[in-house]
Image (cartoon, coloured by chain):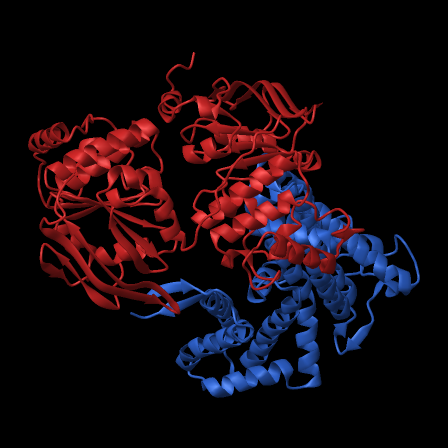
Chain colours: A blue, B red
């Protein structure tokens, strides 16, 4: 068996790859489902039904998609420049803190100004958190994987302190949660629990796509990601571009936090994110780091999670099947990406 | 060196090998006689490597047969050719740096389940071999501490220790000084006298003329000539290799103008205080090509990096166009109008995963006309790419093609186009023709000379002495970070340069 690098990747193959990968993942999960005694086909049908089959299901899926678009974009932007931001979770919570600080009465503005202000502050807070790892990386070559990952725990503990102390909601009957945001700061609902955050997320994806392909910054980010040494040789200010990338990436994750607090939950608590920051990495990888692809892969992963919830309620299957399906589709995706770049030749 | 009527030791008949649409070897037949040196000459991609890989069983030929000493190889495994007495010395050595010479040589020749080594016997045999062929090595020296020439001797001894009758040398002189090359040729002479046969793969015409008895020229997978060396000449061989007459590169004398680069006592130190560049004085003026010769690893890379802004000067002065550069950087070098042609096209010069137009604006993407207010002007950049592709004769499907798909020669043309289109005052080129086809080499040389004639100063760092002697108005030799006095190419012999390269007569 030999592997040969393809000269060019046919576009149909590139589009087909994620679909084949998803199918393969579902196929691989089939024995697992049969093992629990449930009929696989019916289970998958329940899953699709539960994710997309009704107005309620669709709105649940879309509201779950929203934060994943933000964290997915955060990972996609950073990874494109080979800046390994694993700290989406921490930046997400930073954005949520910003939404709580500015959205609970500190400033009062009409909604038309309040909502942009919250997103802006979330962007700034998320970006600032990633500034430290970025500076450490560009100045003294500290591995950003370690720093961004560990900052997640710092931020979570800080959130825990905030909601038990300074930001604690006195009206929450002792539950550890922060003061809810004021009505002017709430994002308008679109369909069921789906809110304006989804639109903001899609707009961000389009903006990142344009930035990547049209802007000097996007060009520099791609250049650094593809060949750091040549980029430096060509006079691109590598350190500066990495800082900008980091701010952008952290900022996007922070906007996700704002969107969850102001759009869905209404207040900051420790269960705001079931690992959206980490799942964002999978979202980005499944999308092959393409910003528009992120929207679709976020939708897919959200559908799997929501669908699996419905499936477990209906057929009494464990919900962690969703994790298995998502992880398997990522693995299958990585293999199929590899196979789009290489061709296998049997001797 | 004798005998063409002698016994045939290796016979390749009608070898054919196809990769996809590419016919890498098309009906190749050749014979190697006992006691002769056969030069296999051809450009990159002519099929030399494929042919050798087929001989060693790395690839299976689509059709054709290989006979070694009259016995047909099935061509199934590398072991088969080795067992039949064929040995190969690769261009990139396959030695373990942390083992001694003796261990490297005996490695793999002994059974795995042997309790102790008969070191004394192996040692005796090695010493005897090294004595009879004049390949002096210290069996107990660690390979990591040997020079490149010595390592090559170890590689040859390794083959001889395995009783090879046919020795294949792949580009053996690429890394050697002229003296080391000469001593290799003496060794080859002794080997053939004792009855071995040698296949000498090369693209250096002078060496092929000097060492071989017979030349086989490959071009696009076919044998285009098979002739006794004595009946041919370098000009004819070059034409055979390329398939068309090559224009002669000639340098018209010009009187140099103002200095565009000057280094005074320039020193670059590592953090540990090791001097990579040691008090170098160097001037390049307009209308002149200054060559830097030397065995690689003697500070040429540091010199290149210093001028192109990748490393900072530790002490001394660097002046470009008469302006002192205290805080030099790649961006400053570009702003000062330095055209930089780096040694490593893939790693440094180009971003091969990006498209052609993106690579062509790499050094000036942030300025008009290629961008405005932070946005790229893709149409302008693509039009710029079209112009350069046309002007520098880059063979590519479109400006939107990924650079990775281009050949080395076309990649080099992209870099040349990128930097020369800016009308640079100083050009610094490191190994600009390494790994290129003869046609592309000539093209690069002519572009550099044309730029010189237009008034640029060129600093040319190369390991290819022929290239340096053809192009340079003046010449320096580098050895351990130091620079020799300025030499005139017509007033110095290759032998003298070789001595300087080996560090002799450096004060």
Q: Quadrant of residue A189?
A: bottom right
Q: Position of residue B81 (x, y in %)?
A: 16, 54
Left or right of residue A262: residue B64:
left
Q: Nearer the viewer, residue A293 or B302?
A: B302
Q: Is residue A172 visible?
A: yes
Q: Position of residue B191 (x, y in %)?
A: 15, 37
Q: Nearer the viewer, residue B51 or B4?
A: B4
Q: Is residue A161 visible?
A: no
Left or right of residue B297: residue B373:
right
Q: Residue at x 35, y 24 (%)?
A: B495
Q: Position of residue A156 (x, y in %)?
A: 65, 51
Q: Nearer the viewer, residue B441 or B231?
A: B231
Q: Residue at x 63, y 43 (%)?
A: B419
Q: Position of residue B422 (x, y in %)?
A: 68, 43
Q: Residue at x 10, y 36 (%)?
A: B117
Left or right of residue B475: residue B494:
left
Q: Nearer the viewer, residue B387 or A213?
A: B387
Q: Residue furthest front?
A: B231
**Count of marks, rendered view:** 0
In this rendering, the answer to whether B124 lies above or below A116 is: above
Q: Quadrant of the N terminus of chain A?
A: bottom left
In this rendering, the answer to whether B375 lies above or below B344 is: below
Q: Quadrant of the C terminus of chain A?
A: bottom left
């Amino acid at each position: 068996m030999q592997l040969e690098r393809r000269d060019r990747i046919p576009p149909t193959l590139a589009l087909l790859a994620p679909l084949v990968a998803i199918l393969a993942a579902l196929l691989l999960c089939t024995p697992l489902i049969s093992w629990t005694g449930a009929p696989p086909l019916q289970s998958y049908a329940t899953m699709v039904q539960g994710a997309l089959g009704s107005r309620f299901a669709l709105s649940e899926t879309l509201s779950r998609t929203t934060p994943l678009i933000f964290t997915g974009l955060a990972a996609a932007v950073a990874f494109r420049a080979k800046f390994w931001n694993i700290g989406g979770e921490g930046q997400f919570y930073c954005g949520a803190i910003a939404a709580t600080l500015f959205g609970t009465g500190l400033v009062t503005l009409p909604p038309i100004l309040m909502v942009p202000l919250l997103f802006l502050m979330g962007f700034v807070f998320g970006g600032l958190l990633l500034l430290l790892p970025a500076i450490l990386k560009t100045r003294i070559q500290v591995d950003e994987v370690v720093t961004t990952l560990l900052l997640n725990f710092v931020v979570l503990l800080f959130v825990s302190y905030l909601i038990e102390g300074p930001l604690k909601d006195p009206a929450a009957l002792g539950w550890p949660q922060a003061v809810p945001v004021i009505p002017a700061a709430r994002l308008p609902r679109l369909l069921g629990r789906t809110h304006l955050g989804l639109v903001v997320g899609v707009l961000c994806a389009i903006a990142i796509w344009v930035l990547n392909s049209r802007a000097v910054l996007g060009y520099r980010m791609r250049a650094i990601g593809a060949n750091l040494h040549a980029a430096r040789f060509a006079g691109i200010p590598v350190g500066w571009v990495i800082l900008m990338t980091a701010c952008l990436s952290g900022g996007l994750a922070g906007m996700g936090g704002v969107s969850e607090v102001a759009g869905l939950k209404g207040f900051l608590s420790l269960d705001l994110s079931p690992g959206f920051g980490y799942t964002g990495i999978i979202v980005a990888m499944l999308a092959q780091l393409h910003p528009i692809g992120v929207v679709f892969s976020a939708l897919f992963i959200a559908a799997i999670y929501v669908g699996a919830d419905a499936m477990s309620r209906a057929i009494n299957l464990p919900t962690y099947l969703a994790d298995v399906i998502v992880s398997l589709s990522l693995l299958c995706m990585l293999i199929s990406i590899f196979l789009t770049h290489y061709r296998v030749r049997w001797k | 060196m004798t005998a063409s009527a002698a016994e045939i030791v290796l016979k390749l008949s009608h070898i054919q090998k196809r990769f996809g649409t590419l016919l890498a070897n098309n009906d190749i037949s050749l014979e190697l006689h006992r006691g002769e040196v056969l030069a296999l000459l051809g450009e990159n991609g002519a099929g030399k490597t494929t042919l050798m890989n087929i001989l060693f069983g790395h690839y299976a030929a689509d059709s054709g047969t290989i006979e070694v000493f009259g016995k047909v190889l099935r061509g199934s495994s590398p072991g088969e050719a080795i067992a039949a007495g064929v040995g190969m010395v690769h261009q990139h050595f396959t030695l373990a740096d942390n083992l001694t010479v003796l261990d490297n040589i005996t490695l793999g020749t002994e059974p795995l389940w042997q309790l102790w080594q008969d070191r004394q016997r192996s040692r005796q045999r090695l010493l005897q071999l090294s004595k009879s062929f004049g390949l002096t090595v210290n069996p107990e020296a660690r390979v990591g501490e040997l020079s490149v020439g010595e390592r090559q001797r170890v590689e040859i001894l390794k083959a001889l220790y395995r009783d090879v009758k046919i020795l294949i040398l792949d580009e053996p002189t690429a890394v050697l000084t002229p003296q080391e090359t000469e001593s290799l040729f003496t060794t080859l002479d002794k080997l053939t006298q004792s009855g071995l046969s040698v296949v000498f793969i090369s693209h250096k015409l002078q060496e092929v003329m000097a060492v071989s008895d017979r030349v086989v020229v490959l071009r696009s997978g076919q044998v285009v000539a098979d002739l006794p060396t004595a009946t041919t000449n370098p000009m004819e061989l070059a034409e055979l290799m390329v398939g068309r007459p090559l224009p002669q590169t000639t340098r018209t004398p010009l009187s140099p103008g103002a200095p565009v680069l000057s280094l005074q006592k320039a020193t670059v130190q590592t953090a540990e205080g090791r001097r990579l560049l040691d008090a170098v004085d160097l001037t390049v003026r307009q209308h002149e090509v200054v060559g830097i010769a030397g065995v690689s690893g003697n500070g040429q890379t540091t010199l290149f990096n210093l001028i192109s802004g990748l490393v900072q000067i530790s002490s001394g002065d660097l002046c470009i166009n008469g302006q002192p550069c205290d805080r030099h950087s790649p961006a400053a070098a570009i702003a000062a109008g330095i055209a930089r042609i780096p040694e490593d096209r893939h790693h440094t010069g180009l971003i091969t995963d990006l498209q052609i137009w993106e690579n062509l604006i790499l050094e000036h993407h942030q300025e008009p006309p290629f961008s405005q207010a932070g946005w790229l002007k893709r149409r302008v950049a693509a039009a710029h790419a079209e112009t350069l592709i046309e002007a520098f004769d880059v063979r590519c499907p479109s400006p939107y093609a990924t650079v990775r798909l281009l050949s080395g020669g076309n990649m080099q043309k992209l870099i040349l186009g990128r930097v020369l289109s800016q009308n640079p005052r100083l050009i610094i080129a490191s190994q600009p023709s390494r790994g290129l086809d003869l046609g592309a080499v000539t093209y690069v040389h002519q572009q550099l000379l044309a730029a010189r004639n237009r008034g640029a100063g060129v600093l040319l760092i190369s390991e290819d002495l022929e290239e340096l002697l053809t192009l340079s108005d003046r010449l320096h030799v580098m050895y351990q970070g130091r620079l020799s006095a300025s030499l005139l190419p017509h007033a110095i012999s290759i032998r003298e340069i070789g001595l300087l390269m080996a560090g002799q007569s450096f004060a």
